[in-house]
Amino acid sequence: MKLIFAGTPDFAAVALKALLDAGHELLLVLTQPDRPSGRGMKLTPSPVKRLAEAHGLPVRQPLSLKRDEDASAAIAALDADAMIVTAYGLILPASLLAVPRFGCINIHASLLPRWRGAAPIQRAIEAGDTETGISIMQLEAGLDTGPVFIRAKTPIHPDDTAATLHDRLAEMGARLICETLPRLPMTGEIQDDACATYANKIDPAETVLDWQKDAKLLARQVRAFYPARAELLGEPLKIWAARPLLFTHNAPPGSLLTADDEGIAVACTQGALLITELQKAGGKRLPAAAFLRGAPAFRQCQSLVANRK
């Protein structure tokens, strides 16, 4: 098919590579403008732009499709069969949705109508969902409300992080979009709006662990935000891995209960969070045992644990 592709991060680049490998003709690639990145804040192209340029594909990077009339006119002039959209990051104006022959088709990382919106992978883990998947859907004016052509499921394993689930779903999405295109036109399944949930964009403030919460929720947040953030003994830390401990204690939330090679146990309102991998500002990501060798203040904490289950 003759396709337009709109996407920005690694998740989208996996799909673009699959479409190229399948022999589709990519008429145009849309991606977000280059962003400052790294310590030098050098303008850096998106993964999708890097892949597109490596294959000699034309690339446009409008700040807004609603306000960029030239970009909209260029899209309309291409006579594309479909526009494939995934993790693009910009809203498509309604005037563009029906321009390609088969419209605009989205690769969405959830089992719609569950987790419509910007952060479906993280929200599924945070909520404790046991499965998620990919939905290939027709874009319409509403937020992820269009009919769904194909869904595919995958379990969310107890040790899945946003990173591991992202990679698995990216491969699933790439495979499914290639399976869907030869079957067009299709009639999609209408979503039940009453069952919809919304995956709001992650606010940086959310990634700071609140010790007043249940340890089981905090462990899911570590996996979802990957890393989460916390402050212990006055030191800001990134928390890369942790698991909940179910035992009783009388310590105030946020107190250190134990600090040994097994991990750093922090009191929560219910149970405790055992931090097993962490990173201090300017330091390396380390297992707890290695971290503690350079953090004597943590090792001096006395155990308050009682009645461990």
Image (cartoon, rainbow, N blue to C red):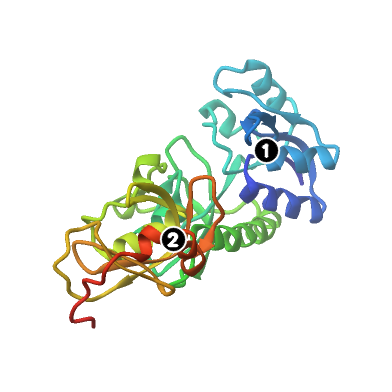
The quadrant the C terminus occupies is bottom left
Which residue is at the front of the view, 218 or 180? 218
Which residue is at the front of the view, 123 or 255? 255
Amino acid type at mark 1: Ser
Which residue is at the front of the view, 197 or 80? 197
Q: Where is residue 245 in the image (x, y as percent from the top left)?
A: 30, 73
Amino acid type at mark 2: Arg
Of the two numbered discs 1 and 2 on the same chain, state the one appearing first in sequence: 1
64 above or below 109? above
Identify the disc placed on residue 105. Answer: none
Label 2 near label 1: C-beta < 8 Å? no
Q: Residue placed at 54% from the left, 36% from the top?
A: 89
Reading the image, the residue beneath label 1 is: 46
How far apart are the alpha carbons under marks 1 and 2? Answer: 25 Å
Q: Position of residue 13 (x, y in %)?
A: 69, 48
Reading the image, the residue beneath label 2 is: 223
